C-alpha cells in the first residue's frame, strides 16, 4: 500500500531572499573582474589543456545532474513530492544533453558526425534552454499533484523521449541548423540572443520560486541561489570570445555550482526535511514516554508478553506431539501472555462429571479437577465462548479453586474447541478484582482456538502412535531357541514425540539345519508403515518356506510390493539363511545397512551386492521420471537381487541393525557405523543379549534418551570355540 502524500508547509511569500542576493553580488564581481576590471584575469588557454579541464567540469556537472535525479526520484517514493520528481526528471534530461555536449566538444572523438565548436554550442544552448524552461514550469507544479501525467510512469518515458529528441537530431543534422559559433568570429548573434532568452527564463523562474513555490524557506533559498548562479553562468557565456578562454571557464564553474545548489535544495525537501520530521516526532514521542513512563512500561511489557506468547503458539502447534507436553506448553503460554496468578488446562473426564486438570500453574496442591456444573469453566463450555467474572465472591454458587498464593477473585475461562467439539477448557485466575477485560476475553478466545488445533493434533498422534506401537509389537516375533546358536533381538521405539517407524526383524527355523535371519525397515512412519512391515514379513516368510534363496526372496518381494506401494514408499531388507552344520551363510541385500560379523580376530561390516530397496520401480515410475541426480542413493533403481555366500568361523557373531542406530544424533553428529563397530570389537566375548543391550544403551546415552527413530537389533552367536577362517563367495 502506498503511503499517504505528505502535508507540505506553506511558507510566507517572499520574492527573493538574501542568500540569492548575496550569491548574485559574488557572481557579478567574478564576471566583472574577469571581463572588465582586471584585464590580466582574461586569458585564452591552450586547446589541449583546456579540453581536459572542460571535460572534467562537464563530467562534474553531469554527475551532479544525475545525483539531482537520484535524490528526487528516491525522495518521491518516500514523500510523493511531485515538484521534486519533475525537477529530478528534468535534470536527467539535462545531464543526458550535457553528456552529448561534452562528447561533441571540438577536440573530442566524433559523436554521430564530426565535432565542431558550433555543434557543441548547439547542445549547450539546448541543455540550458530546456533547464531554464523546466525550472520555470517547476515553480508552478504542486508538490502534492494527483494528475496522472505527473506520475513517474508518465514523466519518466516523456523524459527519455525528450532527451532522445534533442540529442539525436542535433548530432546528425547540426550542419543544417543555424550556427552558434563561427571560428575566427566567435559567437553568433543567435547564440547570444538564445543566452539572453535563457537568462530571462531564469530570472522569471527565480521570481516564481519565491512567490509561488510552496516549499520550506531553506529549500526556496537554495533554489533561488542556484538560479541566480545560473544567470551569471549564462552571462559569462554571452561574453566569451573563444571556446578556450577564462570567461568560458567561469561559465562552466558557475554551472557546476548552480547544479550543486539545486541538489542541496532537493536534498532538503526530499531527505533532510522528512528526516527532521522523523527526529521531531521521535522527540515528541520520547516526551510522551517520559510523561507517562509507568503506563508506557506496563503497556510495553504487556505487548512483549503478547508478542512472545503468540510467536510461540506455532511451537505449540508443531514442536510437541505429546498431549501432556502440549497441554503444559499451553499453560505456560497462557500464564505468560495474561500475567495471571494461576492457570488450569483441563479435559473432559470419561468416567466422572468433571474436567480433569492435566496442566496447571499457581494452583494449590490437590486441585485435580473442575466441576462440570456451577463453575466459570462449565459456563464457557456451555456457551462456547469466553466467560469472565470480575468478582467471584459475588457469585457464591460458582466453584473457585485454592491458589498457591492468595485467593482467587477474578476468573477468565475459554473453551478449547475444534469444529464444535470440546477437547478441553482453559481457565485463568487472579487474586485482584476485575483483573480481566473485554479485550482479554477476545484474546483468550483467539489463543484457545489455536490451542485447540495443538491439542487435537497431539491427541490424534497419541492415538495413532498407540495403535501403531501395539500393532508393531504384536508383529515382531519372539526369537526361537536354536541348538548351538544364541539369538537375541530388541526393538526400541523412538522418543514419545516421534512417530512409530516400520522396523522389522525375524528369525525363522526353516528345518533342522537351516535358520533364516532377516531385518528391514519401511520408509515412512505411523500405522501405514507398520502395516507395510507386516505384509513384508509375512510374504518373506512364505517365500523362505518355499525354499527360495535370499536373492529369489527379494526378487519375489519386489514383484509383489512394487504393485502395492505408493510412489514414495519402499522397504530395505537384508535376508540370510544360515546352514547350522557347515556355517555357510547365504544372503541378499535390498538397500539395507550390511550386518557386522564378529570373530575372535575382530569385527567388520559384511560385503556383497546391494541392488536397492524393494518397491522402488513403482516409486520411480509414478514419480514422473525423476532425474538420476534427484534420487537418493538408497532408492536407486534395482538391477536384480544376487545371492552372496560366506562361510562363518565356528566362533562367529552376527549383528543386524536398522538405520535408527546410524541416525541417532547428538548436536548434529550421527552415531554412525564407526561407533557400532567399536562396541562390537569391545564385545567379541559377550553374549548376544549383552551385545544388543550395549548397543541400545550407547544409543540412548548418545542422544540423551531422545531417539529420533525406532531401532531394531538382531544378534546371533555361536558357542565360543576355537576360531576358524572367514571365507566369502560373492
Image (cartoon, rainbow, N blue to C red):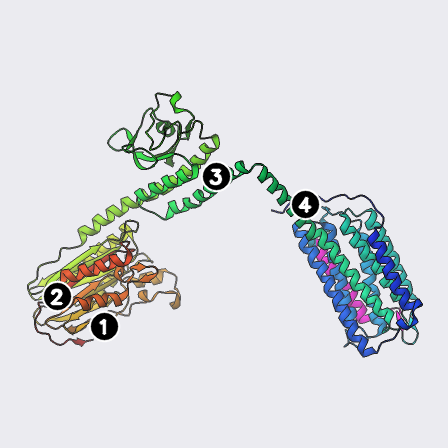
Rendering coords of residue 720 (x, y %) = 9, 69
Q: How many marks?
A: 4
Mark 3 sits on what residue? 302
Q: Which residue appears at 42% of the width and 36% of the height? A: 339
Alpha carbon of mark 2 to alpha carbon of mark 4: how far?
Answer: 84 Å
Please give the range of residues in magenta: 154-182
Q: Is residue 543 visible?
A: no
Alpha carbon of mark 3 to alpha carbon of mark 1: how far?
Answer: 65 Å
Mark 1 sits on what residue? 608
Q: Which residue appears at 45% of the width and 44% of the height? A: 308
CA neighbours of label 4 inside 10 A, class few (<14), some (14 to 19), many (20+): some
Mark 4 sits on what residue? 5
Q: Which mark is residue 566?
A: none
Q: Is residue 117 magenta?
A: no
Mark 2 sits on what residue? 717
Q: Is residue 181 magenta?
A: yes
Instruction: Please give left or right for residue 282 compared with residue 233 in the image.
Output: left
**Magenta residues: mostly which secondary structure?**
helix
Rendering coords of residue 95 (x, y %) = 75, 64
Alpha carbon of mark 4 to alpha carbon of mark 3: how far?
Answer: 33 Å
Give whichever of discs 2 and 4 has the lower sequence position. 4
CA neighbours of label 3 inside 10 A, class few (<14), some (14 to 19), many (20+): some
Amino acid at each position: 500500500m502506498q503511503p499517504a502524500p505528505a502535508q507540505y508547509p506553506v511558507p510566507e511569500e517572499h520574492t527573493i531572499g538574501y542568500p540569492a542576493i548575496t550569491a548574485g553580488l559574488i557572481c557579478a564581481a567574478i564576471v566583472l573582474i574577469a571581463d572588465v576590471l582586471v584585464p590580466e584575469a582574461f586569458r585564452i588557454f591552450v586547446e589541449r589543456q583546456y579540453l581536459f579541464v572542460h571535460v572534467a567540469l562537464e563530467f562534474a556537472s553531469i554527475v551532479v545532474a544525475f545525483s539531482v535525479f537520484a535524490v528526487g526520484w528516491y525522495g518521491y517514493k518516500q514523500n510523493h513530492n511531485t515538484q521534486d520528481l519533475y525537477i529530478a526528471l528534468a535534470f536527467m534530461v539535462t545531464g543526458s544533453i550535457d553528456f552529448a555536449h561534452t562528447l561533441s566538444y571540438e577536440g573530442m572523438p566524433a559523436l554521430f558526425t564530426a565535432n565542431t565548436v558550433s555543434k557543441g554550442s548547439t547542445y549547450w544552448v539546448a541543455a540550458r534552454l530546456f533547464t531554464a524552461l523546466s525550472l520555470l514550469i517547476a515553480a508552478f507544479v504542486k508538490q502534492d499533484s494527483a494528475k496522472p501525467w505527473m506520475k513517474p510512469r508518465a514523466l519518466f518515458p516523456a523524459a527519455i523521449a525528450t532527451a532522445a529528441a534533442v540529442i539525436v537530431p542535433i548530432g546528425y543534422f547540426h550542419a543544417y541548423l543555424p550556427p552558434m559559433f563561427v571560428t575566427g568570429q566567435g559567437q553568433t548573434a543567435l547564440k547570444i540572443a538564445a543566452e539572453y532568452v535563457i537568462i530571462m527564463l531564469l530570472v522569471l523562474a527565480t521570481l516564481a520560486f519565491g512567490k509561488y513555490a510552496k516549499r520550506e524557506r531553506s529549500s526556496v533559498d537554495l533554489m533561488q541561489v542556484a538560479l541566480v548562479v545560473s544567470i551569471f553562468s549564462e552571462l559569462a557565456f554571452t561574453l566569451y570570445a573563444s571556446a578556450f578562454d577564462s570567461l568560458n571557464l567561469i561559465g562552466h564553474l558557475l554551472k557546476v555550482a548552480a547544479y550543486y545548489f539545486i541538489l542541496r535544495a532537493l536534498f532538503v525537501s526530499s531527505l533532510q526535511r522528512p528526516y527532521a520530521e522523523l527526529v521531531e516526532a521521535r522527540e515528541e514521542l520520547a516526551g510522551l514516554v517520559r510523561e507517562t513512563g509507568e503506563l508506557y512500561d506496563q503497556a510495553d511489557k504487556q505487548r512483549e508478553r503478547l508478542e512472545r506468547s503468540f510467536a510461540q503458539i506455532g511451537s505449540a502447534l508443531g514442536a510437541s506431539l505429546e498431549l501432556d507436553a502440549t497441554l503444559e506448553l499451553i499453560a505456560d503460554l497462557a500464564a505468560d501472555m495474561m500475567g495471571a496468578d494461576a492457570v488450569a488446562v483441563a479435559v473432559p473426564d470419561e468416567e466422572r462429571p468433571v474436567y480433569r486438570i492435566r496442566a496447571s500453574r499457581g494452583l494449590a496442591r490437590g486441585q485435580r479437577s473442575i466441576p462440570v456444573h456451577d463453575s466459570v469453566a462449565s459456563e464457557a463450555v456451555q456457551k462456547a465462548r469466553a466467560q469472565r467474572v470480575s468478582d467471584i465472591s459475588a457469585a457464591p454458587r460458582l466453584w473457585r479453586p485454592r491458589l498457591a498464593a492468595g485467593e482467587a477473585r477474578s476468573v477468565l475461562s475459554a473453551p478449547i474447541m475444534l469444529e464444535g467439539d470440546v477437547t478441553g477448557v482453559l481457565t485463568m485466575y487472579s487474586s485482584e478484582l476485575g483483573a480481566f477485560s473485554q479485550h482479554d476475553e477476545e484474546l483468550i478466545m483467539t489463543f484457545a482456538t489455536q490451542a485447540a488445533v495443538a491439542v487435537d493434533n497431539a491427541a490424534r498422534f497419541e492415538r495413532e502412535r498407540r495403535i501403531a506401537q501395539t500393532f508393531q509389537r504384536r508383529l515382531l516375533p519372539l526369537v526361537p531357541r536354536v541348538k548351538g546358536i544364541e539369538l537375541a533381538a530388541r526393538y526400541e521405539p523412538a522418543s514419545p514425540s516421534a512417530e512409530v517407524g516400520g522396523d522389522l526383524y525375524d528369525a525363522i527355523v526353516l528345518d533342522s539345519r537351516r535358520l533364516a535371519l532377516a531385518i528391514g525397515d519401511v520408509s515412512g512412519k505411523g500405522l501405514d508403515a507398520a502395516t507395510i512391515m507386516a505384509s513384508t514379513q509375512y510374504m518373506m516368510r512364505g517365500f523362505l518356506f518355499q525354499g527360495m534363496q535370499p536373492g529369489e526372496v527379494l526378487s519375489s518381494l519386489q514383484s509383489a510390493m512394487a504393485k502395492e506401494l505408493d510412489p514414495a514408499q519402499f522397504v530395505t531388507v537384508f535376508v540370510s539363511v544360515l546352514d547350522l552344520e557347515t556355517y555357510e551363510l547365504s544372503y541378499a541385500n535390498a538397500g539395507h545397512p550390511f550386518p557386522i560379523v564378529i570373530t575372535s580376530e575382530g569385527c567388520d561390516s559384511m560385503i556383497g551386492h546391494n541392488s536397492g530397496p524393494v518397491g522402488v520401480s513403482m516409486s520411480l515410475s509414478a514419480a514422473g521420471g525423476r532425474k538420476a541426480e534427484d534420487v537418493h542413493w538408497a532408492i536407486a533403481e534395482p538391477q536384480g537381487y544376487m545371492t552372496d555366500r560366506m562361510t562363518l568361523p565356528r566362533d562367529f557373531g552376527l549383528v543386524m541393525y536398522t538405520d535408527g542406530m546410524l541416525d541417532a544424533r547428538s548436536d548434529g553428529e550421527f552415531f554412525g557405523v564407526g561407533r557400532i563397530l567399536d562396541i562390537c570389537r569391545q564385545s567379541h566375548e559377550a553374549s548376544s543379549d549383552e551385545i544388543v543391550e550395549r548397543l541400545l544403551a550407547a544409543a540412548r546415552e548418545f542422544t540423551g534418551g531422545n531417539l529420533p527413530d525406532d531401532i531394531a537389533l538382531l544378534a546371533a552367536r555361536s558357542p565360543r570355540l576355537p576360531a576358524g577362517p572367514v571365507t566369502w563367495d560373492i
